[in-house]
Image (cartoon, rainbow, N blue to C red):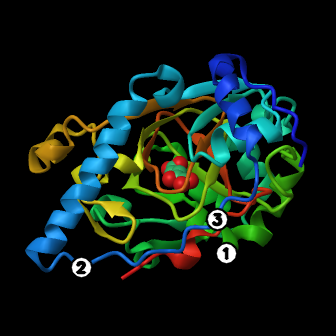
């Protein structure tokens, strides 16, 4: 890897000195071993957890002293090297504009075009979601099959009931293969491993959770509102099952009445529009609501290590 200080996105010019300092000693950092989470059984354990939360809160307060350290940056023409140094390695989200320019899908992927291209091939999607709150945790209960054209009619009608999600990707690879020709590549950041497709109508909602990998969300058509919350806020989010927050939706007054500690949680809001990429680092909480019929891909095939899921204490 070159020792040349990388150029930075315009919004982050003041980070140049910080980056230059890091270059002075750019040896391989020692790897931290995965530490098993303590079970808070004793007063001593509870105090240890409180101290850990204090540490995270103090660090977050310090980051807030500088918008360059704590703000959600938007970048254009972001090279792979700058992405690695300024965002991927620090685990910092970034909205990247313009990198999908020229992808035919941005213009083509209307509901009619999708239905014509994939036709009546049978696909898997998540259905019956409006009957349950825990449809993400209990994904398998919601697996449904239908001819793609029929699914598009359901999605077009809007609401949260039917959603083709990343968890349906493996089952849908052969049926959705004709759409791949409409996609470009993001070689600066990603290998050529395929992304996972999301297709849904206005009103689909993915509740608050974090992922066990770094993710790049690539918005193709429609708009989605994403709320991002840093890992430092975890103690406010009732993290009880797997990667999910019992709060579910930090914009819903009814949920906040049940979880008042989440009211003043530190959060960032991003409106994803066609052609936007959003980097969601591992461990960052996020919830996503579609504001129109929307198509999006999630990519995890970065050029750099992305295997947090292998050591997660799943319980
Ligand atoms: O777009 C969505 O509904 C959810 C996306 C998401 O949470 C993810 O890709 O990790």
Viewer-proximal residue, 146 or 34?
34
Q: Which residue is mark 1?
A: 171
Left/right placement of residue 109 relative to residue 89 reads: right
Eye-nearest disc, 1 or 2 = 2
Local SS, label 2: loop
N-terminal of the two: label 1 or label 2? Answer: 2
Q: Residues within 10 Å of mark 1 (few under 14, many from 20)?
A: few
Viewer-proximal residue, 36 or 250?
36
- Residue at image coords 27%, 38%: 265
Q: Which residue is mark 2?
A: 39
Q: Which residue is mark 3?
A: 30
Residue 49 can be seen, yes or no: yes
Left/right placement of residue 226 relative to residue 37 reads: right
Query: Marks 1 and 2, how far apart in space?
Result: 37 Å
Find residue 173 and report its image quarter.
bottom right
- Residue at image coords 11%, 78%: 42
Viewer-proximal residue, 117 or 104?
104
CB-based contact (under 8 Å), mark 1 and mark 3:
no
Q: Position of residue 79 (x, y in %)?
A: 82, 34
Q: Is mark 3 within 8 Å of ligand 1?
A: no
Eye-nearest disc, 1 or 3 = 3
Local SS, label 3: loop
Left/right placement of residue 5 relative to residue 209 reads: right
Q: Position of residue 169 (x, y in %)?
A: 66, 67
- Residue at image coords 62%, 43%: 279
N-terminal of the two: label 2 or label 3? Answer: 3
Viewer-proximal residue, 140 or 276?
276
Residue 275 can be seen, yes or no: no
């Amino acid at each position: 890897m070159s020792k040349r200080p990388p150029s930075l996105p315009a919004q982050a010019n003041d980070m140049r000195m910080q980056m230059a300092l890091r270059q002075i000693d750019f040896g391989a950092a020692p790897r931290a071993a995965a530490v098993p989470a303590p079970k808070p059984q004793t007063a001593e354990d509870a105090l240890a957890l409180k101290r850990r939360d204090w540490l995270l809160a103090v660090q977050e307060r310090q980051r807030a002293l500088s918008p360059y350290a704590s703000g959600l940056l938007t970048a254009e023409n972001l090279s792979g090297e700058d992405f690695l140094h300024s965002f991927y390695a620090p685990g910092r989200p970034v909205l990247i504009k313009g990198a999908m320019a020229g992808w035919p899908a941005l213009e083509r992927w209307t509901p009619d075009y999708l239905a014509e291209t994939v036709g009546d091939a049978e696909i898997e999607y998540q259905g019956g979601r409006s009957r349950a709150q825990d449809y993400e945790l209990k994904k398998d209960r919601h697996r449904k099959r239908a001819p793609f054209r029929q699914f598009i009619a359901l999605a077009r009608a809007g609401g949260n009931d039917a959603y083709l999600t990343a968890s349906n990707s493996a089952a849908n690879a052969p049926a959705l293969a004709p759409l791949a020709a409409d996609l470009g590549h993001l070689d600066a950041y990603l290998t050529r491993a395929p992304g996972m497709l999301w297709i849904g109508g206005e009103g689909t909602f993915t509740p608050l959770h974090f992922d066990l990998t770094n993710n790049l969300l690539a918005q193709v058509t429609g708009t989605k509102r994403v709320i991002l919350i840093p890992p430092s806020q975890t103690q406010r989010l009732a993290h009880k099952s797997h990667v999910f927050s019992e709060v579910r939706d930090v914009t819903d007054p009814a949920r906040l009445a049940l979880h008042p500690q989440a009211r003043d949680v530190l959060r960032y809001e991003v409106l994803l529009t066609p052609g936007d990429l959003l980097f969601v680092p591992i461990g960052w909480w996020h919830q996503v609501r579609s504001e129109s019929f929307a198509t999006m891909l999630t990519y995890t095939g970065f050029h750099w290590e992305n295997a947090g899921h292998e050591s997660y204490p799943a319980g």
